[in-house]
Image (spheres, rainbow, N blue to C red):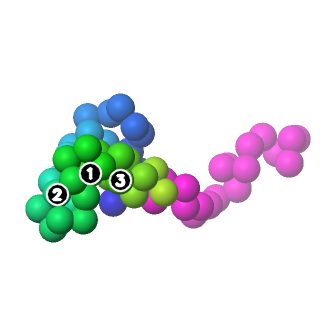
Amino acid sequence: MSGKRPGSKGYDRQRARLRKELEDSGQANDAGADDRANEILQDERGRQGVLRSERGLGPKGER
């Protein structure tokens, strides 16, 4: 899953799909599925990204 921002259309679509999977598999009830889907998606967003160049470190004078 990608790191879409909460509140965006893509994030809402992912959350809805994940919520449906959780409900259908019996892992969460209707009330808890939305909260669990948010936890899963936001936990995945906490991963570190890959730095492909020095530009991501900021201006050279501030490094």
Q: Where is residue 56 in the image (x, y as percent from the top left)?
A: 66, 49
Q: Is residue 52 left or right of residue 16?
A: right
Q: Quadrant of the N terminus?
A: bottom left
Disc 3 secondary structure class:
helix
Indicate yes or no whether the magenta region holds residue 46.
yes
Residue beneath label 2, please?
23
Q: Which residues fall within the magenta stretch?
A: 44-63
CB under 8 Å between discs 1 and 3: yes
Residue 61 picture quarter: top right
Q: Position of residue 51 (x, y in %)?
A: 62, 60
CA separation in Å, label 1 and label 2: 6 Å
- In-front residue for pair 57/42: 42
Residue beneath label 1, please?
33
The disc label shown at residue 36, or none: 3
User: What is the three-letter code of the residue carrying label 3?
Assistant: Arg
**Residue beneath the point at 67% across and 49% down:** 55
Please count the marks in the image: 3
**Residue beneath the point at 70% across and 56% down:** 54
Pointer 1 local density, CA inside 10 Å: few below 14, some 14–19, many at least 20:
many
**Is 25 located above or below residue 54 in the figure?**
below
Residue 6 visible:
yes
CA separation in Å, label 1 and label 3: 5 Å
- In-front residue for pair 62/30: 30
User: What is the three-letter code of the residue carrying label 1?
Assistant: Ala
